[in-house]
Image (tube, grey):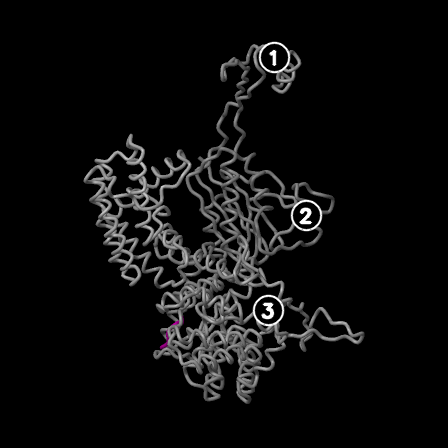
Amino acid sequence: MAELLLELFSEEIPARMQARAAADLKRLVEDGLKKAGLEWTKSEAFVTPRRLALVIDGLPEKQPDVNDERKGPQVGAPEQALAGFMKSLGGMSLDACEQREVKGKTFYFAVMAKKGEPTKNVLVGLINAAIFELPWPKSMRWANTISSWVRPLHNIVAIFNGSPLQADHGLGNKDHVSDEGSIVLSFNAKTFGHRFLNPGPIAVSDFTDYRAKLMDAYVMLCPSERRAEIVSRAEKIAEKAGFTLKPDEGLLQEVTGLVEWPQVLMGAIDAQFMDLPPEVLSDTMRTHQKYFTVLNPDGTPAPHFIVVANQVASDGGAAIVAGNERVLRARLSDAKFFWDQDRKVTLGSRAPKLKDIVFHAKLGTVADKVSRMAALADVLADATGAVKAQAITAAELCKCDLVTGMVYEIPEVQGVIGRYYALNDGEAPEVANAIAEHYSPVGPGDACPTAPVSVAVALADKIDTLVGFWAINEKPTGSKDPFALRRAALGVIRLIVENKLRLGLLDVIKQSYRLIEDPFEKGIIRPPQQLADGTLSPKVKSKSGSSFQLMDPHRLVPEDEVAPDLLAFFADRLKVHLKAEGVRHDLIDAVFALGGEDDLVRLLARVDALGALMGTDDGVNLLAAHKRAANILRIEEKKDGCSYTGAPDAALFAQDEERALFDALASAGAEGHTLAANEKFADAMAALAKLRGPLDAFFDAVMVNADEKNVRENRLKLLSQILTVTSEIADFSKIEG
């Protein structure tokens, strides 16, 4: 068995693309091996800023021999057909073909042994294909190449069984054939070390040799090793100085992709900048400089930062630290200037400037959105328990920081910086906190607001966005979701579920729709501009110079289409949310199938109760009985061409088991209906569970398809009562066995 070592050596690959690229290279090469009929024992991909590497061990030295079988004409077919078949076989005689019977007819079959190709020959083509097929988010062309790659590709190491593969990789065109003057890279057995510390060529023979020599050349090949080294050194440096390292997984992953030989250093922050909000400090360092934040023992920002360099300095890193401190000083000077200037005017006084920011060409400006949010927050305040005046004020102010200098300089602090400005203006803490939290929850790992005012404003923001895009028919399609509407829907679900809000989504959607529809119908929002010739301009231009199409109210998707469709979208997102928590999707389907359920808290209570019932023997047997009754009814109704709905006639019962089931269904149905109406779903499920005994007895003792027509029809109606009673709780037909 042999080993394949592949390395693609290039200019620096963007950190955000590295992990995906390594996985894609591994997938593409493995797919090629599978198609070639080659097996292997293990494979592993690695990535650094300058190289993608792949090692596959346990490969055979040649493809397995196979028999190529071809079906020919029928025995006795015309001579012309036989001649054509023989020609396709490359000289094989008709006598050498087998004769086999297929569906009563005899055909010629040619069986030809095909020798397996040497693996090294197969690898050349599939490696070339994999290099060109790597799906980079962004790619480039350089020099006179026609083919594109993420960054200029300089070298390809391709070693199989200890020897380099003999082939060229042409970057001249997509057929891997070199044109005159194009770049051609020969597969070879040499790599290169660290860009600064050991840039010369290094001869390698296999993966073990390759990895060891790279380490000697100041290259840590494995991302997890570089990551662990960064964390370990950073924590030790911070601890030695009496501080702690602030965890930041996203930054750690990015920095790991920026260095091949991490050197961790600590720098200082000037005291004059320490009165800036902590978020401004950390986001300035994190976003612009890729520095880690250091914390005091009490959790406040310390006047220091951690920087990871890709260079071993002879002075111990003093010059590197000084340079980074100088750059950070300039960054923070800008932040401090905006911090001081922004506080000279109130947050509310900036609201008129929101009219110059287009939210969406068909949905108006941010000022229009804020107006809708304030009205919607007023409505939602009742459900969240918020003080209405505070909810309205927070909604009116929550977007005002978008026109501050601080957000222009550091967009990541939007919302958060608005909180500081609101507090500076004397706004209530509830209002300020709602401004900071109204974007939350952004993702699955983000904390969900719990304060009533914050919840009301966050819901208003997300629901207005969802309803607005549904109204203009800009819904997510397939994997495309440019406006992050799936994320917004999950945010609404989390806000409702985690805060246990009793909220009728359908009614809120309709109210939100009318807030979008009414201003357009009344001509309040963005009236058309009159031109010199007296005509109306089809576009409006904002003060900032951007233009957008006027909204025609008659082109909005009708409310009676938007509301149910958006509610169904929430149902799909709820399944995603619950699936992540281990809840069965079929139970959600069973509850949603009842229709008209738009209270997520009540819906989840039903799902929980149904799940508990399905976890018992009574529940399993009830489901089996339901499916058995449904199957019998479907077959008989199709055969008879009629429906057996309606109440059975008790006078036609011929057996005690029929009467017992009839009485049990009546009792369980009434009890279950009352309990479900009072939202005692667990008790309602328990009432259904009592049907197990009568159902078992009925199916054991009663022949449904009796000879007497009226008795048979009556028993089929009794079966339909099983479906009717269970449908009070859920649609059992949606539940998987």
x, y percent for residue 173? 68, 44
Instruction: State the SS at label 3.
Output: loop
Look at the image and say whether residue 363 sits in the magenta stretch: no
Start-end of magenta stretch = 242-246
Front in this rendered view, residue 659 or 55 = 659
x, y percent for residue 705? 30, 33
| Main secondary structure found in the magenta portion | loop
Q: Is residue 115 left or right of residue 647?
A: right
Q: Which mark is residue 363?
A: 3
Read off the residue under disc 1. 77
Q: Which mark is residue 183?
A: 2
Q: Label 3 amino acid?
A: Leu
Front in this rendered view, residue 507 or 539 = 507
User: Which one is closest to the eye, mark 1 or mark 3?
Assistant: 3
Front in this rendered view, residue 443 or 720 = 720
Front in this rendered view, residue 731 or 355 = 731
Q: Is residue 316 visible?
A: no
User: Which one is closest to the eye, mark 2 or mark 3?
Assistant: 3
Q: Is residue 597 left or right of residue 670?
A: right
- The quadrant of the image that shows the C terminus is top left
Sort mark 3 into few (<14), some (14-19) or many (20+) by Cα contacts within 10 Å. many
